[in-house]
Image: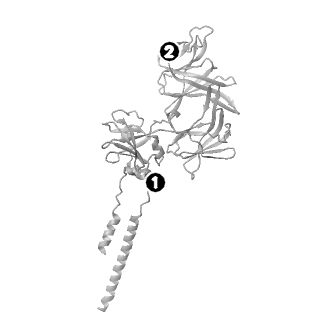
Amino acid sequence: MKGWLIYLLMLGTVSHATAGLAPSDFARGFSLQVPEGGAIYRLEIPAELYRTVINHNLADIAVFNAANELVPHTIHSAIKVDERSERKKVPFFPLYAENEDNTDDLAMRLTRSPEGDILQVRAIPRRERAALTGYLLDISSLTEPLSELQFTWQADGQGGIFALRIDSSDDLVHWQTRIPRGVLAELRFQGQVIQQNTIALPKIDAKYLRIIWPTTNPKLEILTVTGLLNSSVAASDLHWQPALAPNHWEGSEPKEIFYSLETRVTPAAIRITFPEENSFASLALYSRGDERQQWQKRCEKPFYQLRVDELLVEDTLCSFAPAADRLWRLVVVEDGAAFGKGRWPTLAFGFQPRQLTFVGRGQQPFLLAFGSGKPVGELQKYATDVAAVAGRDGGMVDGILVRRAKLGEAVELGGEEALHQPAAPLPWRTWLLWLVLILGVAALGSMARSLLKEMRTKPEE
C-alpha cells in the first residue's frame, strides 16, 4: 500500500509536458523566399491571411524553419504613425501670364531675403491683357512634407466649383504636374452648405508649388493658404477591402443599414459609394464586435457625390481610430440619395497594412503558417518584438540587417480542422489529486483500524 501511495503522489507533482506548436496546428501557409546571408527578414502580410486567421491581432501566425522549429517573429504596422500634426501658413504670390491661353508663359520677378526666402513676387511690367492665372506657393522653409493644403477665398455669395492644377519645382524653371485636376467648391444643397476647401497632396519633395486655373473655369481670389504637416495615416496609405453590400436594413424608409465584415482586418476608414451620382446623405457610422456588445459611434458627417459639367465634388470618406469590429451600422440622419428599393450604399473598408518581421534562424526554406484555433496565450508564447531591433519604419529594409522576403507557393497544412478551438483537455491532474487524497484517507483509515484492533487484543493477552 505504501509503495502505491508514494507512486501516486509522485505522479501528482509531475507537470504534463506539452508539445510545442507544429505546422499542422495551422490551417494554411506560404513558403517564404529569402535572400542568402540575411539575419532578419520582412514582408507585407498577404490578403489571403486576413481571410483565414481567427484573431484580429493576427496572433495565430507563426514562422517555421526547415526543421519545423519556430523562429522569433512580430507583427506590426507597415505605416510609421505619428499622431502629432501641425498647420503652417504657406506664403503665396499671384502669378500672371502675358497670354492667358499659355499658363506656362508666366511673367514674374522674385525678391529674396538673405536667407533665400521669397519675400515678393512681382509681375514684370505687363500689358493690359496680362491675366491672373494662378499662385506660387513657397514651401522651401517647411521641415516636413505637406499632406494637404487648405484654402480660404473671397466669396461672392454665389459659390461654385473651381478646378485647378498643382505643379512642383525646385528651381522655378522645371515643373512637374503633381495633381492634374483638383477641385475646390462651395455649394448650397438642401439647406446644407457644402465646402470643399482642402486638397490632399502626395508626398512631394520640392521647394515650390504652383497652382494653375484652367482658362475655361472661374478663378478664385485666394485669401489664405494653410498646409498640414503630419505623418499620421492618410487614406492613400491605407489598403482597401472590396466594397461591401449591406446584408439587411430596418425601417420602411431605411433608417438603419447593416454590414458584416468577415475578414480580420482592423478598419481605420470607410468610403461610401452611392447608388448614383448627385447624391447627398447625412450618416452616422457605428460598429461593434458581436451582438453582445454595445454599438460604438465611429463618425457622423454629411457624405455627398455631386457632378457639375465635368467637375466632380465629393466627400465619401470618413476616418476614425482603428476598430477591430465585425458588425457595422449606418444610421441615416438625412437622406438625399433615395435609399431603398434596391438602392443601397456600399462600404469599402480601409485598413493599415501590416508587416511580418522574423529572424532567419535555422535552415531554409521558411514557412509562414496562419489560421489556428489554439488559445491565444499559447500562440503568443512564440512571438517576440523583433521589430524593436530591426526598426518599424522599414527604412532598413534591403539593407545590411533587414532584407525583404517574398511569398512562395501556397501550402495546405492542418486545413479547416486547425481553425476550430481544440477540445478542453481532461482534468486528469485534478482527478489524480482527488484519487491520491481518497487513497490517502483510505490508508489512514486502514491504519487506524489496525491500531485499534491491536489495542483491543493487548488487555486479553
Q: Residue furthest right?
A: 191
**Residue 392 quadrant:** top left
**Residue 356 x/y as whole percent:** 41, 41
Quarter of the N terminus within the rendering: bottom left
With 349 as the anchor, is 216 left or right in this view? Answer: right
With 70 as the anchor, is 214 left or right in this view? Answer: right
Q: Which mark is residue 394?
A: none
Query: How would you rate the neighbour count of disc 2 (Cα within 10 Å): few for under 14, some for 14-19, many for 20 or more?
Result: few
**Residue 398 x/y as whole percent:** 36, 33
Q: Secondary structure at mark 2?
A: strand
Q: Is residue 190 above or below residue 116?
A: below
Residue 107 seen from this side: no
Quarter of the C terminus within the rendering: bottom left
Q: Which mark is residue 420?
A: 1
Label 1 vs label 2: CA separation?
A: 70 Å
Q: Is residue 18 above or below residue 6?
A: above
Q: Residue furthest bottom?
A: 460
Which label lies toward us, 1 or 2?
A: 1
Label 1 with label 2: CB-CB less than 8 Å: no
Provide the residue designation for mark 2.
Answer: 112
Q: Amino acid at mark 1?
A: His
